[in-house]
Amino acid sequence: MRQGQQAAAQVFETSVPARMDRLPWDRFHWLIIAALGITWTLDGLEVTLVGSLAGAIHESPSLALSETQVGLSASAYLIGAVLGALFFGWLTDRVGRRKIFFVTVIVYMISSVATGFSWDFWSFAFFRALTGAGIGGEYAAVNSAIQEMIPARRRGTVDLAVNGTFWAGAAIGALSALVVLDPAIIDPEIGWRAAFVVGGALAFVIMLLRSWVPESPRWLMTHGKPGEADHVVSQIEAQVEARQGPLPPLEYGPVRLSRRGKATMREVLHVMLHRQRRRTVLGVTLMACQAFCYNAIFFTYALILTTFQGVPANEVGWYILPFALGNLLGPLLLGPFFDSIGRRTMITATYAISGILMALSGLAFQQGWLNAWEQTLAWTVIFFFASPAASAAYLTVGESFPLEMRAIAIAIFYAFGTGIGGVAGPALFGWLIEGGERTDITLGFLLAAALMVLAAFAEWKLGFAAEGRSLESVAAPLSTHEG
């Protein structure tokens, strides 16, 4: 009898998911977007700074990096991001979302400032790797928290829009580069260093914003803390109700969970390799293909303009700015269709369109048909579609697996996709550009295009419906009690 009572005490029902999903859109949700979504803006700022400043760093009397070293430093950033994602992703599922997204922003802040004081290639690459570790950890912790706190009916729209703010950071980085590389304003040798220092200092503002963000109630719920989860949701409901009046009724019932220990890596791998094998194949394909395409093009964007189009290094920002704005508008304008038309159709379409257009632009580049602005326009149109496709890869991975392993799942797929596509892409394209042959660059473009079309095919065959559904119905928590 006593054992039965103890077993019963380990089982509980909670309406936390239904209560979070029924909330009307409120200032609370804007706070989540502002405080957590800033991660992608920072990443965009960091990546664009290196892209826009590549020419100045290459010509820097103190560093004088070769084209290959510029590509390798980009790969160092991504290697750091991979390792940071894995380490902090593992911690995020164990100790909570809130603690980790404070730690990761501190890592980012310190290492970004340190980059501004680099003295040679090795120090520059090392500090870039540490900066990447902070950003990689942010992806796991922040993606998890955002998906768990946004109502199901808007999860796709918000997730894509937040991921798309990477390009707001890219636009800021491009504009900043125009200032810090203008000899009439500041010595470019000081300017590129100051850009990294200021970028790191912005992290302090982020820490202030995040002090108002609570722990994810869903994380608390699935880690045997239903009382704390209920308390957090009650506080959120009280604030929303005070501003918007009585809340709508619940749209579905409670979930029945068991108190259990933390998910082990053995459980994580069992779910990925056995229970959800199709989703694992899909996630790997989407992440790796978009990572290669994006990082190969964007990390070497400035080098292509300066090497093949004759654009001065201090004017590259003007060409990156429209490209960044196109990438930002894609998720904002197309994002709502991922919740209305559906994930499978929209992901397939965006990957396929961007891949086909990439192949066509590569062939036009080979023939020399495009000048600098025409090349920029072509890439702007391509990545208007590729940007929501890439954001949807993170959305898909987050929705594919149980709550107890969501952060480490995001981290593993981010690490694998970035390791395969992201690290190899910049190094390969840097080497191709250094060779100085348009035909070699075109082969890189065609490879990126083929990978995007492959990802579209994988989504069409393996994609699943998640629009408008609670996270728990898309992927049942490991702690679900069937009795």
Image: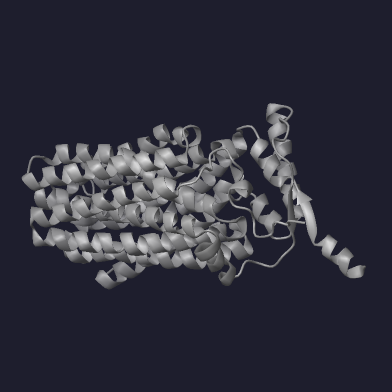
**Is 345 placed above or below 112 here?**
above
Is there any visible trace of residue 109 in the rendered image?
Answer: no
Residue at left 48%, top 66%? 86
Left of 73 or right of it: where is 249? right
Which colour assignment does the render follow?
A: one colour
Left of 321 or right of it: where is 369? left
Residue at left 38%, top 60%? 417
Residue at left 35%, top 48%? 457
**Is 375 placed above or below 455 here?**
above
Query: Extreme front residue here?
Result: 461
What is the total number of numbered labels drawn onto the structure image?
0
Is there any visible trace of residue 129 in the rendered image?
Answer: yes
Identify the image quadrant of residue 248. top right
| Residue 77 drawn at (x, y percent) | 34, 63
| Residue 133 drawn at (x, y percent) | 43, 64
| Residue 375 drawn at (x, y percent) | 16, 41
Position of the N terminus, as image quadrant, is bottom right
Identify the image quadrant of residue 71. bottom left
Residue at left 31%, top 71%? 123
Identify the image quadrant of residue 354. top left
